[in-house]
Amino acid sequence: MTLTISPQMRVVAALGGFAALGLAAFMLTLGRPPSGASEASLAPIKPLHPVRKPTTPAKPQAKPKKAAPKSIVLLPGLAPEVAAALRRHELVVVALFDPHARVDQISLAEASAGARAAHAGFVPLDVLRQGQGGPLVRELGVLPDPAVLVYRRPGDLVARFDGFADRDTVAQAVANAAATMP
């Protein structure tokens, strides 16, 4: 029986053999240290005597003085609840609601969640209580309930939503107001 191999197959077999030899040579040299380096030169050198660093006596650290808190000046005419929230937060979400309306309760919860998500202050104002809603009516006129207002310190109204506003809308309004802050 005669076995004949075509010239193309001989070239492929020769190239495969060279590739196998190259791979074997690479694998053998991979684990060895570089030439000229002995095992002794690769081992870490241990000091003969333990080295102690001289210690210096610790100096008492002077405590940094706290800066006096900046006085926050707010615009006049704000509702007392809104003014108090603006003293604590740069941005405040105000939700106007009627405690007897179911939709207003849902709107109140959404506005609260949006303010919390945006790390803003939150003030719920009952429209049936004259003391809470009166300053806003004097400032903005008649307001519907539910409504959501976003205030920026010192008391600028930066967003107003008449009717229902979900938590994402409220959070985005706060984020937009924060982005335009000086």
Image (tube, rainbow, N blue to C red):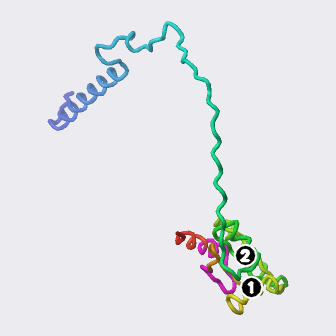
Quick check: 138 above or below 182? below
- Per the image, the residue denoted by label 1 is 135
Which image quarter is the N terminus in? top left
Contact between labelled residues 1 and 2, with CB atoms less than 8 Å apart: yes
In the rendered structure, find residue 18 and report the number of the disc placed on it.
none
**Residue 105 shown in magenta:** no
- Residue hosting label 2: 82
Badge 1: few (under 14), some or many (20 or more) residues near its Cα, within 10 Å? Answer: some
Mark 2 crowd level (few <14, some 14–19, many ≥20, 10 Å Cα): many
**Which amino acid type is marked by label 1?**
Pro
Toward which corner of the image does residue 177 lie, by quadrant? bottom right
Label 2 element class = helix
**Is-magenta flag for residue 172?**
yes
Q: Nearer the viewer, residue 169 or 63?
A: 63
Q: Which amino acid type is shown beneath numbered disc 2?
A: Val
Residue 45 is situated, as x and y percent measured from the top left of the image, at 44, 12
**Residue 107 is drawn in which quadrant?**
bottom right
Range covered by the magenta-colored residues: 157-173
Q: Position of residue 25 (x, y in %)?
A: 29, 23
Secondary structure at numbered mark 1: helix
